[in-house]
Image (tube, coloured by chain):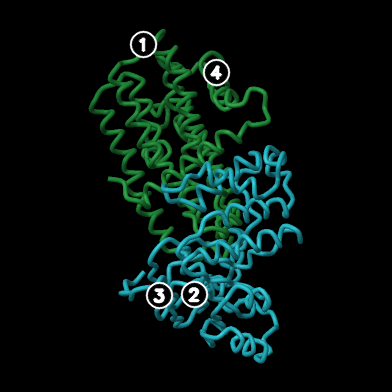
Protein backbone atom coordinates (compact mmCIF):
# COMPACT_ATOMS: atom_id res chain seq x y z
CA UNK A 1 0.00 0.00 0.00
CA UNK A 2 1.42 3.37 -1.03
CA UNK A 3 1.97 5.92 1.68
CA UNK A 4 0.05 9.17 1.25
CA UNK A 5 -0.02 12.00 3.76
CA UNK A 6 -3.44 12.82 5.17
CA UNK A 7 -4.86 16.05 6.45
CA UNK A 8 -6.49 16.62 9.85
CA UNK A 9 -9.93 15.05 10.41
CA UNK A 10 -9.40 12.67 7.54
CA UNK A 11 -10.18 9.06 8.41
CA UNK A 12 -9.64 7.46 5.03
CA UNK A 13 -7.95 8.52 1.84
CA UNK A 14 -8.25 6.44 -1.30
CA UNK A 15 -6.06 7.75 -4.11
CA UNK A 16 -6.05 6.55 -7.73
CA UNK A 17 -6.87 3.04 -6.64
CA UNK A 18 -6.71 0.34 -9.29
CA UNK A 19 -7.49 -3.31 -8.77
CA UNK A 20 -6.74 -5.84 -11.47
CA UNK A 21 -7.21 -9.58 -11.14
CA UNK A 22 -5.21 -11.96 -13.28
CA UNK A 23 -7.55 -14.81 -14.02
CA UNK A 24 -6.62 -18.08 -15.67
CA UNK A 25 -8.02 -18.05 -19.23
CA UNK A 26 -9.35 -21.58 -18.73
CA UNK A 27 -10.62 -21.78 -15.20
CA UNK A 28 -9.37 -25.26 -14.39
CA UNK A 29 -11.20 -26.46 -11.34
CA UNK A 30 -9.42 -29.77 -11.46
CA UNK A 31 -6.11 -31.20 -12.56
CA UNK A 32 -8.07 -33.49 -14.89
CA UNK A 33 -9.51 -30.49 -16.75
CA UNK A 34 -6.05 -28.94 -16.92
CA UNK A 35 -4.63 -32.19 -18.33
CA UNK A 36 -7.36 -32.72 -20.95
CA UNK A 37 -7.12 -29.08 -22.03
CA UNK A 38 -3.34 -29.39 -22.33
CA UNK A 39 -3.68 -32.56 -24.43
CA UNK A 40 -6.44 -31.09 -26.63
CA UNK A 41 -4.69 -27.81 -27.34
CA UNK A 42 -1.21 -27.58 -25.80
CA UNK A 43 -0.23 -24.41 -27.68
CA UNK A 44 -3.27 -22.52 -26.47
CA UNK A 45 -2.54 -23.52 -22.89
CA UNK A 46 1.15 -22.65 -23.13
CA UNK A 47 0.76 -19.35 -24.94
CA UNK A 48 -2.43 -18.11 -23.29
CA UNK A 49 -2.06 -14.81 -21.46
CA UNK A 50 -4.01 -14.58 -18.19
CA UNK A 51 -7.24 -12.62 -18.51
CA UNK A 52 -7.13 -9.23 -16.80
CA UNK A 53 -10.18 -8.17 -14.89
CA UNK A 54 -9.89 -4.46 -14.22
CA UNK A 55 -12.28 -4.15 -11.30
CA UNK A 56 -11.49 -0.69 -9.89
CA UNK A 57 -10.28 2.12 -12.13
CA UNK A 58 -8.58 5.17 -10.64
CA UNK A 59 -10.93 5.39 -7.67
CA UNK A 60 -10.21 8.38 -5.43
CA UNK A 61 -12.10 9.84 -2.48
CA UNK A 62 -11.63 10.78 1.15
CA UNK A 63 -13.73 10.18 4.24
CA UNK A 64 -13.76 12.61 7.12
CA UNK A 65 -15.12 12.51 10.63
CA UNK A 66 -18.95 12.40 10.45
CA UNK A 67 -19.15 11.17 6.84
CA UNK A 68 -21.82 8.52 6.38
CA UNK A 69 -21.22 7.49 2.82
CA UNK A 70 -23.48 5.22 0.82
CA UNK A 71 -21.89 3.11 -1.92
CA UNK A 72 -24.24 2.34 -4.77
CA UNK A 73 -23.90 0.59 -8.10
CA UNK A 74 -25.28 -2.36 -10.00
CA UNK A 75 -23.94 -5.82 -9.28
CA UNK A 76 -20.38 -6.28 -10.47
CA UNK A 77 -19.35 -2.62 -10.47
CA UNK A 78 -16.76 -3.17 -7.75
CA UNK A 79 -18.51 -2.05 -4.55
CA UNK A 80 -17.49 -5.06 -2.49
CA UNK A 81 -14.03 -5.15 -4.09
CA UNK A 82 -13.52 -1.50 -3.12
CA UNK A 83 -14.58 -2.24 0.45
CA UNK A 84 -12.28 -5.27 0.58
CA UNK A 85 -9.37 -3.14 -0.66
CA UNK A 86 -10.04 -0.61 2.08
CA UNK A 87 -10.35 -3.41 4.66
CA UNK A 88 -6.96 -4.80 3.59
CA UNK A 89 -8.34 -8.08 2.25
CA UNK A 90 -7.26 -7.26 -1.32
CA UNK A 91 -3.92 -5.66 -2.12
CA UNK A 92 -4.45 -2.86 -4.68
CA UNK A 93 -2.65 -3.22 -8.01
CA UNK A 94 -1.75 0.46 -7.92
CA UNK A 95 -2.73 3.54 -5.96
CA UNK A 96 -3.05 3.86 -2.24
CA UNK A 97 -5.35 3.45 0.74
CA UNK A 98 -4.49 5.26 3.95
CA UNK A 99 -6.49 4.57 7.07
CA UNK A 100 -6.23 6.72 10.18
CA UNK A 101 -7.72 4.79 13.08
CA UNK A 102 -9.57 1.56 13.69
CA UNK A 103 -11.55 -0.12 10.94
CA UNK A 104 -14.23 -2.77 11.12
CA UNK A 105 -15.73 -4.36 8.02
CA UNK A 106 -18.55 -6.87 7.71
CA UNK A 107 -19.45 -8.58 4.44
CA UNK A 108 -21.77 -11.37 5.60
CA UNK A 109 -23.76 -11.90 8.75
CA UNK A 110 -24.78 -15.55 8.73
CA UNK A 111 -21.44 -17.20 9.44
CA UNK A 112 -20.06 -19.40 12.18
CA UNK A 113 -16.66 -20.92 12.70
CA UNK A 114 -17.12 -24.29 14.35
CA UNK A 115 -20.53 -25.87 13.69
CA UNK A 116 -20.03 -28.44 16.47
CA UNK A 117 -19.49 -25.77 19.12
CA UNK A 118 -22.37 -23.94 20.76
CA UNK A 119 -23.65 -20.48 19.83
CA UNK A 120 -21.89 -18.84 22.77
CA UNK A 121 -18.59 -20.57 21.95
CA UNK A 122 -18.88 -19.42 18.33
CA UNK A 123 -19.71 -15.91 19.56
CA UNK A 124 -16.44 -15.87 21.54
CA UNK A 125 -14.50 -16.99 18.48
CA UNK A 126 -16.21 -14.46 16.22
CA UNK A 127 -15.41 -11.74 18.76
CA UNK A 128 -11.71 -12.70 18.43
CA UNK A 129 -11.91 -12.18 14.67
CA UNK A 130 -14.14 -9.09 14.58
CA UNK A 131 -12.47 -7.30 17.51
CA UNK A 132 -8.83 -8.41 17.18
CA UNK A 133 -7.37 -5.52 19.19
CA UNK A 134 -6.35 -6.54 22.71
CA UNK A 135 -7.92 -3.57 24.52
CA UNK A 136 -11.49 -4.89 24.27
CA UNK A 137 -13.10 -6.62 27.22
CA UNK A 138 -14.28 -9.51 25.05
CA UNK A 139 -16.14 -11.39 27.77
CA UNK A 140 -18.27 -8.33 28.49
CA UNK A 141 -18.73 -7.62 24.80
CA UNK A 142 -19.89 -11.19 24.13
CA UNK A 143 -22.19 -11.19 27.13
CA UNK A 144 -23.84 -7.89 26.03
CA UNK A 145 -24.16 -9.09 22.43
CA UNK A 146 -25.67 -12.46 23.34
CA UNK A 147 -28.15 -10.77 25.65
CA UNK A 148 -29.14 -8.38 22.85
CA UNK A 149 -29.56 -11.29 20.39
CA UNK A 150 -32.37 -12.74 22.59
CA UNK A 151 -31.28 -16.25 21.65
CA UNK A 152 -31.62 -17.33 25.28
CA UNK A 153 -31.28 -21.07 25.78
CA UNK A 154 -30.33 -21.54 22.10
CA UNK A 155 -26.92 -20.10 22.94
CA UNK A 156 -26.00 -23.51 24.39
CA UNK A 157 -27.18 -25.37 21.29
CA UNK A 158 -24.62 -26.44 18.61
CA UNK A 159 -24.22 -23.78 15.94
CA UNK A 160 -24.95 -26.28 13.14
CA UNK A 161 -28.57 -26.35 14.32
CA UNK A 162 -28.98 -22.58 13.92
CA UNK A 163 -31.16 -21.27 11.10
CA UNK A 164 -29.81 -18.46 8.90
CA UNK A 165 -31.93 -16.00 10.85
CA UNK A 166 -30.49 -17.15 14.19
CA UNK A 167 -26.95 -16.93 12.82
CA UNK A 168 -27.68 -13.41 11.55
CA UNK A 169 -29.03 -12.43 14.99
CA UNK A 170 -25.84 -13.55 16.70
CA UNK A 171 -23.48 -12.02 14.13
CA UNK A 172 -25.35 -8.71 13.90
CA UNK A 173 -25.51 -8.43 17.68
CA UNK A 174 -21.75 -8.94 17.87
CA UNK A 175 -20.76 -6.54 15.12
CA UNK A 176 -23.01 -3.78 16.42
CA UNK A 177 -21.50 -3.94 19.92
CA UNK A 178 -18.78 -1.29 19.69
CA UNK A 179 -18.24 1.80 17.50
CA UNK A 180 -14.99 2.37 15.59
CA UNK A 181 -13.29 5.01 13.40
CA UNK A 182 -14.44 3.55 10.09
CA UNK A 183 -17.25 1.09 9.77
CA UNK A 184 -17.84 -0.76 6.49
CA UNK A 185 -21.21 -2.47 6.21
CA UNK A 186 -21.87 -4.44 3.04
CA UNK A 187 -25.59 -5.23 2.72
CA UNK A 188 -25.76 -6.39 6.31
CA UNK A 189 -29.42 -5.75 7.05
CA UNK A 190 -30.55 -8.84 5.12
CA UNK A 191 -30.98 -12.21 6.79
CA UNK A 192 -32.63 -11.40 10.10
CA UNK A 193 -36.40 -11.68 10.61
CA UNK A 194 -38.64 -8.58 10.37
CA UNK A 195 -38.90 -8.01 14.14
CA UNK A 196 -35.19 -8.34 14.77
CA UNK A 197 -34.35 -6.26 11.67
CA UNK A 198 -36.14 -3.27 13.24
CA UNK A 199 -34.32 -3.80 16.52
CA UNK A 200 -30.90 -4.29 14.92
CA UNK A 201 -31.40 -1.36 12.51
CA UNK A 202 -31.93 0.95 15.48
CA UNK A 203 -28.80 -0.42 17.17
CA UNK A 204 -26.68 -0.18 14.01
CA UNK A 205 -27.88 3.38 13.42
CA UNK A 206 -26.81 4.17 16.99
CA UNK A 207 -23.43 2.59 16.36
CA UNK A 208 -23.11 4.44 13.04
CA UNK A 209 -23.68 7.77 14.79
CA UNK A 210 -21.04 6.84 17.40
CA UNK A 211 -18.50 5.77 14.74
CA UNK A 212 -16.12 8.20 13.03
CA UNK A 213 -17.21 7.47 9.46
CA UNK A 214 -19.27 4.85 7.72
CA UNK A 215 -19.14 3.25 4.29
CA UNK A 216 -22.52 1.67 3.71
CA UNK A 217 -23.20 -0.63 0.74
CA UNK A 218 -26.85 -1.15 -0.06
CA UNK A 219 -29.27 -1.37 -2.97
CA UNK A 220 -32.09 0.08 -0.85
CA UNK A 221 -32.72 3.78 -1.58
CA UNK A 222 -34.71 4.17 1.66
CA UNK A 223 -31.91 2.68 3.76
CA UNK A 224 -29.38 4.95 2.07
CA UNK A 225 -31.55 8.02 2.71
CA UNK A 226 -31.95 6.98 6.36
CA UNK A 227 -28.26 6.27 7.03
CA UNK A 228 -26.15 8.39 4.65
CA UNK A 229 -25.28 12.07 4.25
CA UNK A 230 -23.20 11.48 1.12
CA UNK A 231 -23.37 9.04 -1.79
CA UNK A 232 -20.76 7.52 -4.08
CA UNK A 233 -22.06 5.84 -7.23
CA UNK A 234 -19.82 3.34 -9.00
CA UNK A 235 -20.22 2.27 -12.62
CA UNK A 236 -17.85 -0.17 -14.30
CA UNK A 237 -15.21 0.41 -11.63
CA UNK A 238 -15.27 4.23 -11.91
CA UNK A 239 -16.65 6.75 -9.45
CA UNK A 240 -19.39 8.51 -11.46
CA UNK A 241 -20.88 10.48 -8.57
CA UNK A 242 -19.52 11.60 -5.22
CA UNK A 243 -21.72 14.02 -3.30
CA UNK A 244 -25.33 14.70 -2.47
CA UNK A 245 -27.50 11.62 -1.74
CA UNK A 246 -30.61 12.64 -3.72
CA UNK A 247 -28.77 13.61 -6.89
CA UNK A 248 -26.72 10.40 -6.66
CA UNK A 249 -29.88 8.31 -6.31
CA UNK A 250 -31.45 10.17 -9.26
CA UNK A 251 -28.36 9.50 -11.38
CA UNK A 252 -28.44 5.83 -10.42
CA UNK A 253 -32.14 5.57 -11.31
CA UNK A 254 -31.72 7.61 -14.54
CA UNK A 255 -28.85 5.50 -15.77
CA UNK A 256 -31.40 2.70 -15.97
CA UNK A 257 -28.61 0.40 -14.96
CA UNK A 258 -30.78 -1.81 -12.84
CA UNK A 259 -29.81 -4.77 -14.93
CA UNK A 260 -27.63 -7.36 -13.24
CA UNK A 261 -24.32 -8.38 -14.71
CA UNK A 262 -21.37 -10.16 -13.30
CA UNK A 263 -17.71 -10.25 -14.24
CA UNK B 1 9.56 -8.25 20.16
CA UNK B 2 6.20 -9.32 18.77
CA UNK B 3 4.52 -6.54 16.78
CA UNK B 4 0.78 -5.74 17.09
CA UNK B 5 -0.18 -7.60 13.91
CA UNK B 6 1.87 -10.66 14.87
CA UNK B 7 0.40 -10.71 18.36
CA UNK B 8 -3.16 -10.55 16.92
CA UNK B 9 -2.27 -13.34 14.47
CA UNK B 10 -1.01 -15.68 17.19
CA UNK B 11 -3.89 -14.89 19.55
CA UNK B 12 -6.37 -15.76 16.82
CA UNK B 13 -4.41 -18.92 15.95
CA UNK B 14 -4.50 -20.02 19.60
CA UNK B 15 -8.23 -19.30 19.93
CA UNK B 16 -8.97 -21.33 16.79
CA UNK B 17 -6.67 -24.15 17.88
CA UNK B 18 -8.49 -24.46 21.20
CA UNK B 19 -11.83 -24.44 19.36
CA UNK B 20 -10.58 -27.17 17.00
CA UNK B 21 -9.41 -29.27 19.95
CA UNK B 22 -12.77 -28.80 21.66
CA UNK B 23 -14.94 -29.50 18.67
CA UNK B 24 -13.20 -32.45 17.07
CA UNK B 25 -14.58 -35.10 19.40
CA UNK B 26 -17.28 -33.13 21.19
CA UNK B 27 -20.04 -35.69 20.74
CA UNK B 28 -17.89 -38.68 21.63
CA UNK B 29 -17.71 -40.35 25.04
CA UNK B 30 -13.91 -40.60 25.23
CA UNK B 31 -13.24 -37.22 23.56
CA UNK B 32 -9.57 -36.25 23.45
CA UNK B 33 -8.56 -39.83 24.35
CA UNK B 34 -9.52 -40.96 20.83
CA UNK B 35 -7.17 -38.43 19.27
CA UNK B 36 -4.26 -39.85 21.24
CA UNK B 37 -5.42 -43.46 21.13
CA UNK B 38 -5.68 -43.63 17.33
CA UNK B 39 -1.93 -43.26 16.60
CA UNK B 40 -1.03 -45.41 19.61
CA UNK B 41 -3.27 -48.24 18.36
CA UNK B 42 -1.86 -47.91 14.84
CA UNK B 43 1.64 -48.02 16.32
CA UNK B 44 0.93 -51.11 18.45
CA UNK B 45 -0.61 -53.08 15.58
CA UNK B 46 2.15 -52.20 13.12
CA UNK B 47 4.81 -52.97 15.69
CA UNK B 48 3.31 -56.43 16.18
CA UNK B 49 2.85 -57.13 12.43
CA UNK B 50 6.21 -55.89 11.16
CA UNK B 51 8.41 -57.11 14.00
CA UNK B 52 6.75 -60.32 15.18
CA UNK B 53 4.92 -61.50 12.06
CA UNK B 54 7.07 -60.22 9.18
CA UNK B 55 10.28 -60.43 11.23
CA UNK B 56 11.89 -57.12 10.25
CA UNK B 57 15.07 -57.51 12.26
CA UNK B 58 16.22 -54.25 13.77
CA UNK B 59 17.45 -53.77 17.30
CA UNK B 60 14.99 -51.63 19.31
CA UNK B 61 12.33 -51.94 16.61
CA UNK B 62 9.71 -50.39 18.91
CA UNK B 63 11.79 -47.21 19.15
CA UNK B 64 12.59 -47.26 15.44
CA UNK B 65 8.91 -47.51 14.51
CA UNK B 66 8.00 -44.79 17.02
CA UNK B 67 10.47 -42.43 15.32
CA UNK B 68 8.99 -43.15 11.89
CA UNK B 69 5.30 -43.89 12.27
CA UNK B 70 4.09 -41.17 14.65
CA UNK B 71 5.71 -38.29 12.70
CA UNK B 72 4.25 -39.90 9.55
CA UNK B 73 0.74 -39.91 11.06
CA UNK B 74 1.22 -36.23 11.98
CA UNK B 75 2.31 -35.42 8.40
CA UNK B 76 -0.54 -37.41 6.86
CA UNK B 77 -3.27 -35.95 9.08
CA UNK B 78 -1.93 -32.41 8.66
CA UNK B 79 -1.77 -32.58 4.85
CA UNK B 80 -5.20 -34.16 4.56
CA UNK B 81 -6.85 -31.72 6.97
CA UNK B 82 -5.22 -28.48 5.85
CA UNK B 83 -5.31 -28.95 2.07
CA UNK B 84 -9.08 -28.22 1.80
CA UNK B 85 -9.15 -25.77 4.73
CA UNK B 86 -9.21 -22.48 2.76
CA UNK B 87 -12.00 -23.78 0.53
CA UNK B 88 -13.99 -25.00 3.55
CA UNK B 89 -13.57 -21.65 5.33
CA UNK B 90 -14.43 -19.67 2.18
CA UNK B 91 -17.60 -18.04 3.44
CA UNK B 92 -15.97 -16.94 6.66
CA UNK B 93 -12.90 -15.59 4.87
CA UNK B 94 -15.10 -13.44 2.66
CA UNK B 95 -17.06 -12.11 5.64
CA UNK B 96 -14.41 -10.47 7.83
CA UNK B 97 -10.94 -9.06 7.20
CA UNK B 98 -9.15 -12.08 8.63
CA UNK B 99 -5.80 -13.54 7.68
CA UNK B 100 -6.63 -16.86 5.95
CA UNK B 101 -3.39 -18.36 7.23
CA UNK B 102 -4.72 -18.51 10.78
CA UNK B 103 -6.88 -21.45 9.69
CA UNK B 104 -3.86 -23.34 8.32
CA UNK B 105 -1.73 -22.60 11.39
CA UNK B 106 -4.52 -23.49 13.83
CA UNK B 107 -5.19 -26.87 12.22
CA UNK B 108 -1.49 -27.64 12.18
CA UNK B 109 -1.06 -26.64 15.82
CA UNK B 110 -4.06 -28.78 16.77
CA UNK B 111 -2.45 -31.79 15.06
CA UNK B 112 0.94 -31.00 16.61
CA UNK B 113 -0.55 -31.04 20.13
CA UNK B 114 -2.18 -34.41 19.46
CA UNK B 115 1.07 -35.72 17.97
CA UNK B 116 3.12 -34.63 21.00
CA UNK B 117 0.63 -36.23 23.42
CA UNK B 118 0.61 -39.57 21.54
CA UNK B 119 4.41 -39.52 21.06
CA UNK B 120 5.03 -38.95 24.76
CA UNK B 121 2.54 -41.69 25.73
CA UNK B 122 4.59 -44.22 23.74
CA UNK B 123 8.05 -42.78 24.38
CA UNK B 124 7.91 -42.64 28.17
CA UNK B 125 7.38 -46.38 28.83
CA UNK B 126 9.78 -47.30 26.01
CA UNK B 127 12.48 -44.98 27.33
CA UNK B 128 12.06 -46.58 30.75
CA UNK B 129 12.15 -50.22 29.60
CA UNK B 130 14.29 -50.07 26.43
CA UNK B 131 16.57 -47.16 27.27
CA UNK B 132 17.08 -44.11 25.07
CA UNK B 133 20.19 -41.92 24.94
CA UNK B 134 19.31 -38.81 27.03
CA UNK B 135 20.98 -36.61 24.37
CA UNK B 136 18.68 -38.17 21.81
CA UNK B 137 15.69 -37.10 23.91
CA UNK B 138 17.19 -33.59 24.12
CA UNK B 139 17.39 -33.59 20.31
CA UNK B 140 13.72 -34.55 19.82
CA UNK B 141 12.28 -31.01 20.25
CA UNK B 142 14.63 -29.78 17.47
CA UNK B 143 13.45 -32.61 15.22
CA UNK B 144 9.87 -31.67 16.15
CA UNK B 145 10.33 -27.98 15.33
CA UNK B 146 11.89 -28.80 11.97
CA UNK B 147 9.07 -31.24 11.24
CA UNK B 148 6.48 -28.59 12.14
CA UNK B 149 8.01 -25.89 9.95
CA UNK B 150 8.51 -28.28 7.01
CA UNK B 151 4.93 -29.56 7.21
CA UNK B 152 3.73 -25.96 7.53
CA UNK B 153 5.44 -25.09 4.24
CA UNK B 154 3.84 -28.03 2.41
CA UNK B 155 0.37 -27.43 3.96
CA UNK B 156 0.52 -23.72 3.13
CA UNK B 157 1.38 -24.49 -0.51
CA UNK B 158 -1.24 -27.21 -0.90
CA UNK B 159 -4.07 -25.27 0.76
CA UNK B 160 -3.58 -22.42 -1.73
CA UNK B 161 -3.21 -24.81 -4.70
CA UNK B 162 -6.46 -26.53 -3.70
CA UNK B 163 -8.38 -23.27 -4.09
CA UNK B 164 -7.52 -23.23 -7.80
CA UNK B 165 -7.31 -26.98 -8.47
CA UNK B 166 -9.95 -28.71 -6.43
CA UNK B 167 -8.69 -32.24 -6.88
CA UNK B 168 -5.40 -31.37 -5.17
CA UNK B 169 -6.75 -32.90 -1.96
CA UNK B 170 -7.59 -36.19 -3.67
CA UNK B 171 -4.14 -36.30 -5.23
CA UNK B 172 -2.62 -35.64 -1.80
CA UNK B 173 -4.52 -38.61 -0.32
CA UNK B 174 -3.42 -40.85 -3.16
CA UNK B 175 0.23 -39.77 -3.06
CA UNK B 176 0.36 -40.19 0.71
CA UNK B 177 -0.96 -43.74 0.54
CA UNK B 178 1.72 -44.59 -2.03
CA UNK B 179 4.47 -42.77 -0.13
CA UNK B 180 3.65 -44.69 3.03
CA UNK B 181 5.24 -47.74 1.43
CA UNK B 182 8.02 -45.86 -0.37
CA UNK B 183 9.19 -43.97 2.72
CA UNK B 184 11.40 -45.88 5.18
CA UNK B 185 9.00 -45.70 8.10
CA UNK B 186 8.60 -49.31 9.14
CA UNK B 187 11.76 -50.59 7.45
CA UNK B 188 15.29 -49.11 7.59
CA UNK B 189 16.65 -47.18 4.60
CA UNK B 190 19.46 -49.72 4.40
CA UNK B 191 16.96 -52.29 3.04
CA UNK B 192 16.37 -50.12 -0.03
CA UNK B 193 18.68 -51.20 -2.91
CA UNK B 194 21.69 -48.93 -3.03
CA UNK B 195 21.11 -48.00 -6.67
CA UNK B 196 17.82 -46.22 -5.87
CA UNK B 197 18.55 -45.12 -2.30
CA UNK B 198 19.34 -41.60 -3.46
CA UNK B 199 15.71 -41.33 -4.61
CA UNK B 200 14.47 -42.06 -1.10
CA UNK B 201 16.77 -39.38 0.25
CA UNK B 202 15.08 -36.84 -2.03
CA UNK B 203 11.71 -37.55 -0.41
CA UNK B 204 11.04 -34.44 1.75
CA UNK B 205 8.76 -36.38 4.10
CA UNK B 206 11.56 -38.85 4.83
CA UNK B 207 14.02 -36.00 5.38
CA UNK B 208 11.70 -34.61 8.09
CA UNK B 209 11.18 -38.02 9.73
CA UNK B 210 14.82 -39.13 9.69
CA UNK B 211 16.00 -36.96 12.67
CA UNK B 212 13.45 -38.71 14.92
CA UNK B 213 14.84 -42.11 13.96
CA UNK B 214 18.44 -40.95 14.51
CA UNK B 215 17.57 -39.40 17.88
CA UNK B 216 15.90 -42.56 19.17
CA UNK B 217 18.21 -45.25 17.75
CA UNK B 218 21.96 -45.13 18.46
CA UNK B 219 22.10 -41.36 18.85
CA UNK B 220 25.38 -39.75 17.80
CA UNK B 221 25.68 -35.98 17.46
CA UNK B 222 27.16 -35.76 13.97
CA UNK B 223 24.64 -37.91 12.03
CA UNK B 224 21.83 -36.27 14.01
CA UNK B 225 23.09 -32.78 13.08
CA UNK B 226 23.41 -33.86 9.45
CA UNK B 227 19.83 -35.22 9.42
CA UNK B 228 18.54 -32.04 11.10
CA UNK B 229 20.26 -29.96 8.41
CA UNK B 230 18.55 -32.04 5.69
CA UNK B 231 15.21 -31.58 7.48
CA UNK B 232 15.85 -27.84 7.81
CA UNK B 233 16.47 -27.70 4.04
CA UNK B 234 12.82 -28.68 3.49
CA UNK B 235 11.70 -25.62 5.50
CA UNK B 236 14.36 -23.34 4.02
CA UNK B 237 13.24 -24.20 0.50
CA UNK B 238 9.56 -24.75 1.21
CA UNK B 239 8.63 -21.72 3.31
CA UNK B 240 9.85 -19.04 0.84
CA UNK B 241 8.24 -21.00 -2.00
CA UNK B 242 4.91 -21.18 -0.16
CA UNK B 243 5.15 -17.50 0.81
CA UNK B 244 5.86 -16.47 -2.79
CA UNK B 245 2.96 -18.56 -4.13
CA UNK B 246 0.71 -17.12 -1.43
CA UNK B 247 1.75 -13.54 -2.23
CA UNK B 248 1.12 -14.10 -5.92
CA UNK B 249 -2.30 -15.71 -5.47
CA UNK B 250 -3.56 -13.88 -2.36
CA UNK B 251 -5.99 -11.63 -4.24
CA UNK B 252 -7.27 -14.25 -6.67
CA UNK B 253 -8.10 -16.67 -3.86
CA UNK B 254 -11.31 -14.77 -3.05
CA UNK B 255 -12.51 -15.07 -6.65
CA UNK B 256 -12.34 -18.85 -6.48
CA UNK B 257 -13.66 -19.45 -2.95
List the residue tagged with mark 4: B44
The colour with which the image depicts chain A is: cyan
Q: CA distance from mark 3 to mark 1?
A: 66 Å
The colour with which the image depicts chain B is: green
Return the chain for callout 2.
A
List the residue tagged with mark 3: A13
Q: Residues within 10 Å of mark 4 (few under 14, many from 20)?
A: some
On whether disc 4 and disc 3 are found on a single subunit, the reply is no
On whether disc 2 and disc 1 are found on a single subunit, the reply is no
Mark whose residue sits in front, 2 or 1: 2
Looking at marks 1 and 4 on the same chain, the residue that comes earlier in the sequence is marked by 4
Where is residue B142? Give x, y as percent: 32, 31
Where is residue B47? Give x, y as percent: 52, 18
Q: Is residue B136 above or below residue A203?
A: above
Q: Which quarter of the image is occupied by the N terminus of chain B? A: top left
Q: Nearer the viewer, residue A61 or A178?
A: A178
Looking at marks 2 and 3 on the same chain, the residue that comes earlier in the sequence is marked by 3
Residue A61 horizontal side relative to residue A124, left or right: left
Q: Which quarter of the image is occupied by the C terminus of chain B? A: bottom right
> Residue visible at 57% across and 27% down?
B35
Q: CA distance from mark 4 to mark 3?
A: 63 Å
Q: Nearer the viewer, residue A173 or A210?
A: A210
Residues at circles 2 and 1 in contact by the CB criterion of under 8 Å: no
Where is residue A244? Give x, y as percent: 55, 86
Where is residue A242? Give x, y as percent: 51, 85
SS at mark 2? loop
Q: Nearer the viewer, residue B168 or B128?
A: B128
Residues at circles 1 and 4 in contact by the CB criterion of under 8 Å: no
List the residue tagged with mark 1: B131
The outermost residue toward the top is B129
Q: Residues within 10 Å of mark 2 (few under 14, many from 20)?
A: many
Amino acid sequence: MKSISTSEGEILRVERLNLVFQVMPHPFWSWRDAFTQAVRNPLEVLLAEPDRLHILKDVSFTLRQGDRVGLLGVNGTGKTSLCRCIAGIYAPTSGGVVMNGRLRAIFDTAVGIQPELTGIENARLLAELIYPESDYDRERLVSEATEFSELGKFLDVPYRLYSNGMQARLCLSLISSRPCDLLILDEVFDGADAFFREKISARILKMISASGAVLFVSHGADQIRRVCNRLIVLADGHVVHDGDVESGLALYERSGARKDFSF
Amino acid sequence: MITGAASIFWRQVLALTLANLKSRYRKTVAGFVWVVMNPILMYSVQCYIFHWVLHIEIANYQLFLLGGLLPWIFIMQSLEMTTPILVNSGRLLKSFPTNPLIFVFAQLLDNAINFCAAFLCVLLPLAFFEGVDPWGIVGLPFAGLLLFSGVLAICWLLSVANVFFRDTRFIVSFVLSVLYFLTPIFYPVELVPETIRWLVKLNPLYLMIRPFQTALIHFTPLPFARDCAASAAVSILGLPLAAAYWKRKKNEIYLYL
